[in-house]
Image (cartoon, rainbow, N blue to C red):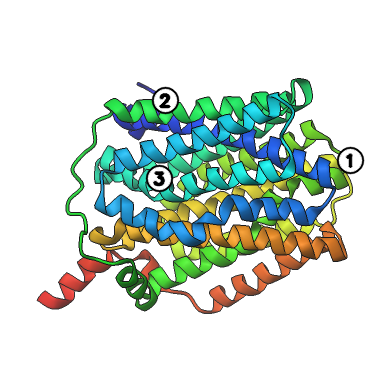
């Protein structure tokens, strides 16, 4: 199939990728509708930030448990059951919206249920990728997964904004409930490869200790945590910036869609640069600094059109971070700890996003959303400059267990 990426010519991965794309689009419909409704009902950036905490908060308690489930049990079944939980929660929100009982407390309660399913299932979803493709396709598969997330970020918010304006939130929540079924059905019949041993004796505490002492994993996890905390407001508080720029529900959808379009472009640029030998460690530092600059510009944009362009540029470097750190962790982590390391990765993504969005929302209540964004950008600049002065070469080295084996036989 000419013009089709090689990894998409693998039937199992292609089915998985398309189903994930459908599910991610549905999730964005949900995000746009819930965030817009909460801001419309409360007119409070702090409450919108609290919604992000409720959505992402389960990761504090459950991300490492999700990683353990991915290592100890059948990953196919773990993903199916956690997606079923999210489908029921989204369906409940659709029903409540249809009957006119969707209040802020109800939105928060059902969003929490969605967050539980997401927290328990994401490590399993990420850990399925090596079972779907040969090792030589692994980096391409991770990059394409990230590109799919941003295709969903492009299409989902735009559709969500239009649906919200035309027919209301019930359709957004209902479509999301059905979208989870796509991946559940695909996983019924897709064939998975044997990816080697799984851990039944390596504890989460051991994985944390290993990550703490390995310079590459330590830098990757800390970098992701700080980026997630200070970059998250650009996404989670998008309803607020849309309001400041004079945009309604449709405008909100297009702002988030612009970020998704930038992510697609960013994935292509990154793939080109990596093919020319750009080290992952260097690229992570550059992505942090460039994103910080774009976030700073967003804090002063005067018009919606200008904000649309800047959101697209933010999306370019946002996706760099998620592709680079996800790939680097999976290529560095010992094979028997892959699920748990992905659980830690999820923890340092979702937890800081929740804290950062809530903190930025409360700070914006005091100083305004523009100064809130400027503050976050300043913190990212400081961290990016520190990384520039303190590089970690091990990020681009081989798998940690392989290096240990070489050291023992040398």
Please give the label number shown on residue 142.
3
Question: Residue 212: percent from the left, percent from the top?
Answer: 39, 76
Q: Residues within 10 Å of mark 3 (few under 14, many from 20)?
A: many
- Disc 3 on helix, strand or loop? helix
Judge left or right: residue 190 versus residue 212: left
Quick one: label 1 or label 2, which is nearer the N terminus?
2
Quick one: label 2 or label 3, which is nearer the N terminus?
2
Whether residue 47 is visible: yes
Quadrant of the rendered image containing residue 83 = top left
**Which residue is found at the position 73% from the left and 43% from the top?**
104
Please give the label number shown on residue 246.
1
**Which residue is found at the position 31% from the left and 50% from the top?**
70
Judge left or right: residue 226 versus residue 410: right
- Residue 333 lies, with reference to residue 8, above or below; the image says below
Query: What residue did someone put label 2 on?
Result: 3
Q: Which one is nearer the viewer's eye here, 70 or 213?
A: 70
CA gap, disc 3 and disc 1: 37 Å
Q: Residues within 10 Å of mark 1 (few under 14, many from 20)?
A: few
């Amino acid at each position: 199939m000419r013009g089709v990426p090689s990894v998409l010519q693998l039937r199992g991965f292609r089915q998985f990728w398309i189903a994930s794309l459908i599910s991610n689009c549905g999730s964005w419909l949900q995000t746009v509708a819930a965030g817009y409704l909460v801001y419309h009902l409360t007119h409070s950036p702090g409450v919108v930030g609290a919604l992000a905490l409720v959505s992402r908060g389960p990761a504090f308690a459950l991300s490492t448990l999700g990683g353990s489930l991915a290592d100890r049990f059948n990953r196919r079944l773990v993903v199916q059951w956690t997606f079923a939980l999210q489908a029921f929660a989204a369906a409940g929100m659709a029903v409540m919206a249809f009957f006119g009982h969707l209040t802020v407390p109800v939105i928060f309660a059902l969003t929490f249920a969605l967050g539980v399913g997401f927290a328990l299932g994401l490590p399993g979803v990420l850990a399925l990728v090596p079972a779907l493709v040969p090792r030589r396709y692994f980096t391409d598969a991770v990059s394409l997964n990230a590109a799919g997330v941003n295709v969903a970020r492009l299409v989902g918010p735009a559709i969500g904004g239009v649906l919200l304006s035309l027919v209301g939130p019930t359709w957004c929540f209902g479509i999301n409930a059905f979208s989870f079924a796509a991946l559940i059905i695909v996983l019924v019949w897709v064939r998975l490869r044997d990816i080697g041993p799984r851990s039944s004796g390596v504890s989460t505490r051991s994985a944390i200790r290993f990550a703490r002492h390995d310079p590459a994993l330590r830098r990757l996890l800390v970098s992701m945590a700080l980026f997630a905390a200070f970059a998250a407001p650009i996404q989670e508080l998008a309803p607020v910036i849309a309001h400041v720029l004079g945009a309604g529900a449709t405008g909100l959808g297009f702002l988030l869609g612009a970020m998704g379009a930038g992510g697609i472009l960013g994935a292509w640029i990154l793939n080109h640069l990596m093919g020319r030998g750009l080290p992952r460690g260097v690229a992570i530092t550059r992505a942090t600094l460039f994103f910080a600059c774009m976030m700073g510009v967003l804090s002063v944009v005067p018009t919606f059109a200008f904000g649309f362009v800047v959101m697209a540029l933010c999306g370019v470097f946002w996706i760099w971070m998620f592709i680079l750190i996800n790939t680097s962790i999976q290529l560095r982590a010992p094979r028997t700890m892959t699920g748990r390391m992905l659980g830690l990765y999820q923890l340092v993504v979702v937890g800081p996003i929740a804290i950062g969005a809530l903190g930025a929302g409360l700070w914006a209540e005091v100083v305004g959303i523009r100064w809130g964004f400027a503050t976050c950008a300043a913190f990212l600049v400081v961290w990016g400059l520190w990384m520039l002065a303190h590089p970690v070469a091990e990020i681009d080295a081989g798998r940690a267990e392989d290096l240990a084996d070489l050291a023992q036989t040398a």
